[in-house]
Amino acid sequence: MSWFTQIAGAFIEAWDELRVHRVRVTLALVGIGIAVFAIVAVTGLGSITRQSSIEISERSSGRPASYQLMVSSAATDDKVAIYEAAYKAAIERYGITYQSTSGSAMTRIQFVDGVADVESTIVDPAYGEMHRVKLIEGSWLTSDDADRLAPAVVINETMWNRLGNPSVAEHPTLQVAGAAPTTAVVVGVSANIYPDYPEQMYVLSDAQHLLGASAGGGMMGGMMMGGAYAPPSMDGDEGATATFPTYELWLPLENHEELSSQIVRDLKAALGEGGAVDAQRTDYLAWGEDPFLAVQILVTAVGGIVLLVGTIGFVNLSIVTVKQRVREIGIRRSFGATGGRVFFSILLESVVGTLLAGIVGIGCAIVTLQNPLVQGAITGGLGLTDSVPFPVDAAVLGIVVSVGVGLLAGFIPAVIATRSNVIDAIRS
């Protein structure tokens, strides 16, 4: 209990000294508060920037760990059917939750200002979650949409603007041009991955034939499926050429290599001799260690430099302040204050002061970075599907740094105070 009393007493003395010298202390701690704000804000900024970069990458190439399955063997209708059946069996066998067809085609759309070719991405419902497709209107494609007589599509923001921003609730339609004109229903609008992104739309793999691909209309220039190009046939039947579909899988990180290898073995076995199936990892972690970690380290290092400059200035101010209080310290020593008590009192004055300055700096950083305008400027208006709360590690770092700076800045002045001769101190 005596130790607790001494520590509590030292804290109380430190607080009283801060109150007595609050103007001087406040001026001395302004730099520390700014430095803590800088390092915390920069660390938080790094987290937001990193999250933004990761989401841009995942919208394009999928989440960790994403794989694409591709077949390079010659395709026949029988082999394609066998491959599709083997794939569905493997998905069920290994309990794959997120998987999707991954293909593309050019679809002719009749706009008010003329006909234009629009890139159509052929997907399954899970694709939206796998690629963080962010919707600004309506809803994403579901398995029920495959039963529509008029195919459901999700268009991107650029295409929506070209259509005049119609309300999705009013079920706007698209006129698909070609030998067999079709009407498609817009059920959702996705945000652009990048500004000024060209027109794009998503359609379910089970419904893409309704856009006219098998009737000589709609799909222009052939389809890109499974890495093989299927050119339109001369007799107008573009579906005559068999192609292996490309499938995309989002596998658990803990066993993705083993799982992908097993799926490839199963598919090769189903295709028989000469079946060439490849699983290619596409997400950003396939490049090695987290490539966005360097951004975090860089911005943290910048904040550390700012803090170091502020710490040096505060140490100098603390030394000057203690030398001005030599007489006060000598009187306290003459009334029985031990060297240890004086040491901890001076040290805790610094720690309590820097801690308060750090809390103020952290609060200002939180308010600044959580401002929607600031986050929008950081992400370039991208809009993150996962909101980025203020990182707890940045706040903890701010507290630790504040206490550390207080200990560092208070240690030298505390040593100077305890080494002062009592009699000389009183006479000064």
Image (cartoon, rainbow, N blue to C red):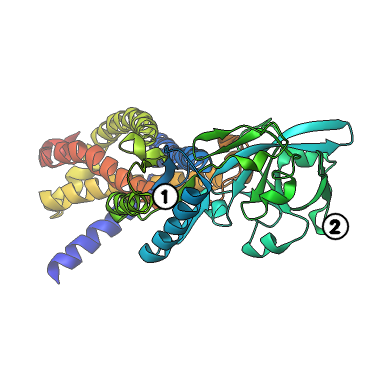
Above/below status of 368 relative to 116: below
Element on which disc 1 rests = helix
Task: Name the amino acid type tagged 2.
Answer: Glu
- Quarter of the image with the C terminus is top left
Image location (x, y in percent) of residue 213? 70, 43
Return the disc, 1 or 2, that comes first in the chain's sequence: 2
Element on which disc 2 rests = helix
The residue that mark 1 highlights is 359
Image location (x, y in percent) of residue 208? 67, 49
Image location (x, y in percent) of residue 267? 37, 52
The residue that mark 2 highlights is 170
Nearest the viewer among 126 and 5 is: 126
- Quarter of the image with the N terminus is bottom left
- Residue 89 lies left or right of residue 325; in this view the side is right
The residue that appears at 36% across and 34% down in the rendered structure is 291
Instruction: Give the distance between the C-alpha atoms of the residues marked 1 and 2, in whole angstroms.
Output: 51 Å
**Residue at far right of view:** 112
